[in-house]
Image (cartoon, grey):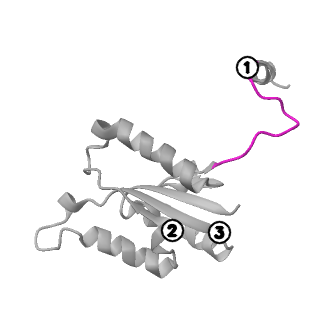
Amino acid sequence: MKKVLVLAPHTDDGELGCGGTVARLLEEGCEVHFAVFSTCAESVPAGFPADELKTEFLSAMESYGIPAEQLILFDFQVRHFPAHRQEILEELVRLNRRIVPDLVLPRRCTMCIRITTPSPRRPSGPSSARASSATRSRGTT
């Protein structure tokens, strides 16, 4: 595994959700990219700079040693993601094409997605899907 993409809805979700995993992957030499979909400026308490959460995120990434060019910050309005569903999906497609990750980490590592290429031993297509389905439904006793 060489390239990892962390998907974080908000600025602190990646570190809080899978920070330990990210630290280990970095130690193992992986190239880690972070995509944050909202900098949450409207959630910052009064009296703090509007970019406080963005600044904290960038500081955390610096402590990990992740280069700035591997950090992608979008500015979708917090708590309004459903209204921007199509735009977010299109950004995800662009990220996948640009980074070509081997592993995608959503904000909770219990939901990790490993990107694999089809095995040459296993045929792909509709007939293999039916065969797999039939095999699963038989079960073993």
What residue occupies the far right of the structure in this picture?
121
Residue 90 percent coordinates (x, y): 43, 41
* CA distance separating discs 2 and 1: 39 Å
Q: Give the left or right position of residue 108, taking residue 85 as reference.
A: right
Inspect the magenta stretch and tell me whether residue 20 lies in it.
no
Q: Nearer the viewer, residue 107 or 52?
A: 52
Give me the residue at 51% from left, 74% from top. 66
Q: Are marks 2 and 1 in contact (CB under 8 Å)?
A: no
Q: Which mark is residue 107?
A: none
Image quadrant in which the C terminus is located? top right
Write down the quadrant of residue 138 in the picture.
top right
Q: Amino acid at mark 2?
A: Gly
Residue 100 percent coordinates (x, y): 61, 53
Magenta residue span: 114-126
Q: Nearer the viewer, residue 91 or 52?
A: 91
Give me the residue at 74% from left, 44% from top. 117
Give me the residue at 26% from left, 59% from top. 40
Q: Amino acid at mark 3?
A: Cys
